[in-house]
Amino acid sequence: MKNAQVIRRHFIVFLTISVLVYTAQCLKLPPEKIDGLLVPDSVNIAKLLDFVREGNIESSVLVESQMTGIITLYSLAWAIHPATSLLINWMLIYLSLRLTADIFTKQSANLHWILLGVTGNPYVYLVAPAPNKEIPLLFLTLLFVYQLIVRPRWWVLYTIIISGAVYSIRDGYGAIVLIIAALHITARRTPRIMVIVGIVVLSVCVFIDQYVADYLSFVVRNKDAINLVKTATGGESTILGVAISGSTDPFLNVLMYYSRIVYNVTTLGVFPIFVSIFHGCYVLGWAFWVFGILIFSGVVSCVIVVLGKQNTAAGNKRLEVAVLVLLLVAAISVSSYVQPRYLMPVLPLAGGVCMSLRLLRMKVIGSVVLLCVGVMLFYAIRGYKLPLADTSDTVNEVPSFVLGAKE
């Protein structure tokens, strides 16, 4: 089957499921049965866009809140009707499917599987009808990796422009992709060494973190987030403990950094939330759990590829992608608190690597599922109960992108 047909089929699946999700969001189902259909971040971004449309917010606030990119992207939708955000996200997902196919161009026989890195993530269906950061960043990450691997004309210039676009949405991530571009340019011919050099460079960044924190806005926000978590939880997270906390000891900071990499990759898979405080099925929690399984499987697959031998053109291309995935995951984990959702833009690449391993993909995914379920059972036997999701902030919300909302 030709690549175009495979892409078309995945896009039709995405269109169909996203329309069904949007219909469910518009129906306002009782939270005692189905809860978590609205993603809080999307609801908050919609409110911000409402304020912008009404002229009730200053541009300086948008710059400080790192919302200029999102406001620019979805302002056209708000000029027509907030519900047309769905069209923007459809376009971005279609382009993401095309880019994924181009990046894994030597893997045509596995393309149906590879594209599941985009359409197999249930979270993107929940945010598809709404303004969000994840789908634009997913697209920009794929566009960034495409420039590095395919290297079309003017690719260096395009990489810098893409980094700027990413920065306008999530400043820390924008800095990350620019650093990784520099690493890739200097060490592309030795990908395994690039991973080692990248980890060393990132470890040094963590080591000197406290000395440069006051000069970088996204590092300052990390410190503020840590203090907020400590205040809310009485000192530390009940699950993640000290792994999310900063330290005045730079050596301890580096050890915490390595633990954050592990936590970012595993925590959504092993510590899910399936039920809300209203005792309804928490759809967002299930979506996060599936995403957690997929990103865990993808990262494990990337490690297998980097440690293995690649003797074909397809294998070498897969190795290059796997190296970039590991560097992105490691760089995102520099953030001083655990935020596995920030790995969302990396999933199409990590999932693509996993799904391209025809003989290993089901073994890897099956092993990850068994491990995650095993950890959950272990905690259940020891009396740990899965927490309930507090959806009180969104259960009565009717955001403007939902049909029937008050204009």
Image (spheres, rainbow, N blue to C red):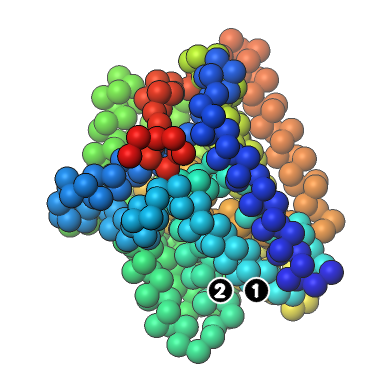
Say whether residue 36 is visible. yes
Say which residue label 1 marks.
Answer: 102
Q: Quadrant of residue 22?
A: top right
Which of pointers 1 and 2 lies earlier in the amino acid sequence? Answer: 1
Please say if the residues under marks 1 and 2 sit with CB atoms less than 8 Å apart.
yes
Q: In which quarter of the image is residue 281?
A: top right
Task: Please tell me which residue is depicted at 51% across the width and 56% down the height of the picture.
Answer: 87
Rendered view: 212 above or below 248: below
Amino acid type at circle 2 is Tyr
Rendered view: 115 above or below 125: below
Left or right: where 13 falls relative to 182: right
* Residue 233 % position (x, y): 33, 22
Q: Which of 68 and 106 is in front in this view?
A: 68
Task: Please tell me which residue is depicted at 74% across the width and 75% down the height of the picture.
Answer: 106
Q: Quadrant of residue 353?
A: bottom right
Task: Please tell me which residue is depicted at 70% across the width and 51% down the height of the picture.
Answer: 13
Label annotation for residue 146: 2
Amino acid type at circle 1 is Asp
